[in-house]
Amino acid sequence: MNFRILEFCWSIFESHSRNLKFKKSKIICFFLLILLNLQSQVTNRILFIFDDSYSMYAPWNSNIKIEVAKKVMGEFLDSLKTMPNLQLALRCYGHTTFIKPERNCKDSKLEVAFADANVNAPKIKQRIQKLEPLGTTPIAYSLKECISDFTPCSNCRNIVILITDGIEECEGNPCQVSIDMQKKGIFLRPFVIGVGLDVKFADVFGCMGKFYDVSNEANFGDVLKLVLTEAIMQTTVQVDLLDITKKPTETDVNMTFYDANTKQIKYNYLHTINTRGNPDTLILDPGMTYNLTVHTIPPIEKNNISIVKGKHNIIPVDAPQGYLRLELDGAISKYFPTTIVRKSGEMKTLNIQDFSKTEKYIVGKYDLEVLTLPRIKLDAIEIKQSSTNTIKIPASGNVFVAKNTSGFGSIFVDDGKKLTWVCNLNNNLQNEIIYLQPGIYKLEFRNENSKETVKTMERKFNVTSGTTTNVKLN
């Protein structure tokens, strides 16, 4: 039901934003959308940057621009007073210094600091009513000053709504400043409302934020409502983890959404199939571009994801997976080895998997290095969609080496043709236990006090799974 409300309302806003015939429907949808969004419990902080430069004295429709702006803004602010999870603030520019004899390119001031809408909506309305246009248009400088306007907040969305009737007049670069502020996470992509501007300025402001052209007094209020709806409305998303047949059957894996600009973590969820058998729905902020990491083995990344406001977005990710199970064959001792798992032909470690455990991997081939003594290497082990490849190795046997004295020694595999080194003994221990795979071995040992090479002792022994082999060095 919520999705239908979102799509219906959005079609009204986008198709009829300038048609007063739909005013009643738009107002109803406006409050429905706000109500749906409030379930998220995130605090939305909106900073209005209000143009009070000298050009706001220009005639426009029934009055001069500043008077129209004061009237429409006052009515709009009245509608926000009872809205929870919303904080408001006001910054003005061009209102403290007369434009002549020279421009004051730092004529920008935070007039009302952030507080809840029920407190600040009347304050902002009252402050706007007292404004008198005087100066110039320092947009870039005003955006830079936002850093101190948005005080630290761990669960807030920082939004800028710029209302202006002119372009930058102080040789600043609003587009670059806006991009820098977004990358630093100061605010989301701004909304720019052009009051009586030529439509050609859409390109000028488009690089700074989303531009709305208020061509006449009648649609000013509607545009404000549309901007607010876009600013605070979050959007539904589902992530389809696709199997080898391109069906969204994969699930139960963690996924992290990063802000593509700041690289900061924005959301972190464990993927779920809901009770209807579909990937569960998430609510994401549509005001940013995302990088997504799905924490499969190996992880899958999808970058620069843009989502459409007011619609149900589907993000497809190819993530076909199967299972690898490691088992010990034979009598099991106290020793359980682990295994290094790598992508076939690569050296990067993807996982360390224990025996008697099943892990899920992306479909493909993997090299295994089992950390037994001696090590077992298994190459190109294939993982297939939704099936389990079970790898068994013999359980180790334990070898009790009784040295009676400290000394130097090593153990080798003896295949009858050559000796292959397995491990060194601990020369600080007189007795030790070593877990070895079944096979034939030789132990070479010399007492540390013996200074003659010919005093080297050699012991040949067999190891069987799950049993103890005693090796005495006398």
Image (cartoon, rainbow, N blue to C red):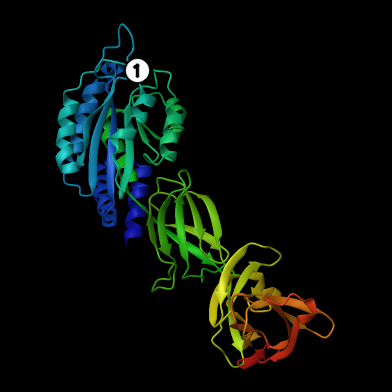
Q: Residue at x 39, y 42 (%)?
A: 185
Q: Where on the picture, by quarter, is residue 327? A: bottom right
Q: What SS does tag 1 mark?
A: loop
Where does residue 24 sit, x and y in percent of width and height?
A: 23, 45
Q: Of 152 and 94, which appears nearest the observer?
A: 152
Residue, far top:
101
Task: Please state if 474 lies on the left or on the right of 173 as rendered.
Answer: right
Q: Of 356 and 230, which appears nearest the observer?
A: 356
Work out whether residue 113 can be spotted: yes
Q: Name the amino acid, label 1.
A: Cys
Task: Please state if 24 lies on the left or on the right of 227 as rendered.
Answer: left
**Residue with the mark numbered 1:** 105
Q: Where on the picture, by quarter, is residue 90? A: top left
Task: Please state if 36 lies on the left or on the right of 275 as rendered.
Answer: left
Q: Where on the picture, by quarter, is residue 441? A: bottom right
Where does residue 455 sit, x and y in percent of width and height?
A: 76, 81
Work out whether residue 194 can be spotted: no
Q: In which quarter of the image is the N terminus?
A: bottom left
Residue, far right:
417
